[in-house]
């Protein structure tokens, strides 16, 4: 059915019976919700999992209610897959472009697999969508991607304040990036998320992109995964330099499947570790031991702000694991290092490699080393607990190593404020008090205070799947720890400290006398305040009596 003129829908919109004009029940429900301002997101396509543009006038009414909706925030347009349906796509695009142009509520538009003409129509209507904040476009079947990028560039230059731009799997190459450059400059002050993954961006295109990003002063997420940067070390260094100059911190930096080399790793990491909170380097198989050493060194830098590092599917073996573990010594910000995913068929790290991380998380050689261990790291793999259940079944002889590692990670995650004390209690049954004796009795209250703060560790629950418990210790056993430590302290105290006991008793007696005097002063002060209040009350009463007497005399006269 041909779409009617907009004036027809405007004239009949208030009293139309949707039961009579829709092609199926699902479409009817969608139109009802749009009309009743009860729909925030809609997916329009020819398939069953979205609004189906079937025969009849469903599409016309859909466009009408989209244009009038005040609640709709997200619109997704999924193109048609059959070449013979070009006319059908044309009707859909024509109807929705008018709806988009009239809308004052839509903030996100996603367009997936339209023809060049279809996308051109939608892109022109987006210029009127001044409230647009997020735009997603994917066009794996487009024959003229460069022209698409030109239109997107024009949209970006139209004055919209776009916050998120996602153009994955468009294969735009250098020409596409060049067409987008001016547009990226125009929205630089508002853009927070940019996704240009899988777009045939080489070193030349990356150089053009970095120049355009110079104006993106609010960028938080950048994804350039799936592009070949094997020969782009210089351009990656330029990207790193830009982040430092702009003083930006990326919450998430996607570099998956980019063939990053050791030189590229060094260019990205050196000097810019305070500019990343999250980096994803999955599937970069070109990185060797040299790259891991560079990364490990950077993780130990005081400037490092990195909180999440994804390195899965990279064949990191025991040597690489040990190098990375050394980088975690002293690191107090990195919480997640994903070395593998729970669905990987083969993990190259053996228990020998995992034990390096276990030692970093809890070095049991001395109490001080345990205290200085890493109490920040919480994850070493995605879906780590499910994975370790399977790992135990296959390698039962290494259960103790795996269980400890899971235990330390979960302790850091669940109770970071107690992690250091818990690890000390777990591995040091008797605390050596000898190092404290050089400060004589001054450290005795501190030692007692430490035990008081450590008391909750005896009953802390943690949510890991290992059968072994964290620390089960009765109150009597914990008190025995304290008494043993205090006995060692007193027994090891220097003789001259014990000889001063009379002096200490005298000081304590004087302290008691001072406390009595202070208490007496408080009592006297309180009595003086009460007397002053009574005097003030009497003075007030006398003034009232005198005033009453004067008033009486004046009345007699």
Image: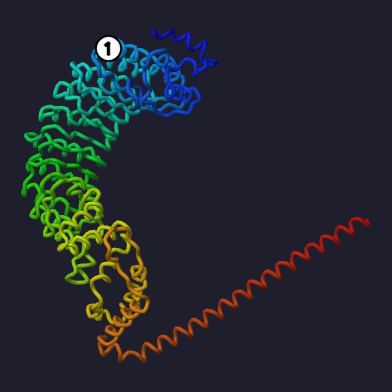
- Does 522 sit above or below residue 301? below
Q: Quadrant of residue 537?
A: bottom right
Residue 431: percent from left, percent from top? 25, 77
Q: Residue at x 63, y 71 (%)?
A: 529
- Does 253 sit above or below residue 550? above
Any part of residue 334 in sight: no
Q: Nearer the viewer, residue 163 or 415?
A: 415
Q: Quadrant of residue 22?
A: top left
Which quadrant holds the C terminus?
bottom right
Q: Nearer the viewer, residue 300 or 520?
A: 300
Label 1 CA crowd tier, 10 Å (few <14, some 14–19, many 20+): some
Residue 475: percent from left, percent from top? 37, 76
Left or right of residue 502: residue 196: left
Q: Residue at x 79, y 62 (%)?
A: 544
Residue marked by disc 1:
86
Left or right of residue 219: residue 29: right
């Amino acid at each position: 059915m041909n779409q009617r003129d907009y004036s027809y829908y405007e004239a009949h919109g208030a009293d139309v019976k949707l039961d009579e004009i829709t092609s199926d029940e699902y479409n009817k429900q969608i139109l009802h919700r749009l009309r009743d301002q009860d729909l925030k997101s809609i997916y329009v396509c020819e398939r069953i999992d979205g609004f189906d543009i079937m025969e009849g006038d469903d599409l016309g009414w859909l466009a009408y209610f989209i244009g009038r909706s005040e609640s709709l925030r997200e619109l997704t347009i999924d193109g048609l897959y059959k070449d013979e349906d070009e006319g059908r796509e044309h009707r859909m695009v024509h109807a929705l472009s008018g709806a988009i142009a009239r809308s004052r509520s839509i903030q996100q538009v996603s367009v997936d697999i339209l023809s060049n003409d279809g996308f051109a129509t939608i892109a022109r209507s987006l210029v009127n969508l001044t409230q647009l904040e997020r735009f997603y476009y994917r066009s794996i079947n487009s024959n003229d991607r460069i022209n698409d990028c030109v239109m997107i560039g024009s949209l970006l230059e139209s004055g919209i304040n776009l916050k998120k731009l996602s153009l994955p799997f468009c294969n735009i190459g250098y020409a596409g990036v060049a067409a987008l450059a001016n547009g990226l400059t125009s929205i630089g002050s508002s853009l927070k998320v940019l996704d240009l993954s899988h777009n045939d961006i080489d070193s030349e295109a990356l150089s053009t992109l970095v120049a355009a990003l110079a104006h993106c002063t609010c960028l938080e997420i950048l994804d350039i995964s799936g592009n070949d940067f094997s020969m782009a070390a210089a351009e990656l260094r330029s990207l790193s330099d830009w982040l430092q100059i702009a003083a930006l911190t990326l919450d998430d930096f996607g570099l998956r499947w980019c063939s990053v080399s050791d030189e590229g790793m060094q260019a990205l990491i050196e000097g810019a570790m305070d500019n990343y909170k999250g980096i994803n380097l999955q599937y970069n198989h070109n990185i060797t031991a040299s790259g891991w050493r560079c990364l490990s060194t950077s993780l130990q830098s005081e400037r490092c702000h990195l909180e999440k590092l994804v390195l899965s599917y990279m064949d990191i073996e025991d040597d690489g694991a040990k190098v990375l573990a050394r980088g975690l010594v002293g690191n107090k910000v990195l919480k997640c290092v994903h070395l593998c995913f729970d669905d990987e068929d083969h993990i190259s790290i053996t228990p020998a490699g995992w034990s390096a991380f276990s030692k970093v998380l809890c070095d049991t050689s001395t109490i001080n080393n345990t205290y200085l261990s890493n109490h920040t790291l919480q994850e070493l793999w995605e879906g780590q607990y499910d994975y370790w259940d399977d790992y135990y079944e296959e390698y039962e002889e290494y259960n103790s190593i795996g269980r400890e590692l899971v235990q330390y990670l979960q302790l850091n995650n669940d109770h970071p404020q107690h992690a250091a004390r818990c690890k000390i209690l777990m591995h040091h049954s008797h605390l050596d008090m000898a190092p404290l004796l050089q400060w004589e009795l001054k450290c005795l209250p501190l030692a007692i205070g430490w035990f008081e703060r450590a008391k909750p560790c005896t009953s802390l629950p943690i949510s890991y799947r290992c059968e072994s418990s964290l620390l089960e210790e009765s109150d009597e056993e914990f008190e025995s720890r304290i008494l043993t430590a205090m006995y060692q302290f007193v027994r090891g105290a220097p003789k001259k400290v014990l000889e001063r006991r009379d002096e200490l008793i005298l000081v304590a007696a004087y302290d008691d006398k001072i406390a009595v005097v202070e208490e007496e002063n408080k009592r006297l002060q309180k009595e003086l305040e009460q007397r002053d209040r009574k005097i003030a009350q009497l003075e007030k009463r006398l003034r009232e009596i005198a005033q009453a007497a004067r008033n009486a005399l004046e009345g007699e006269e």
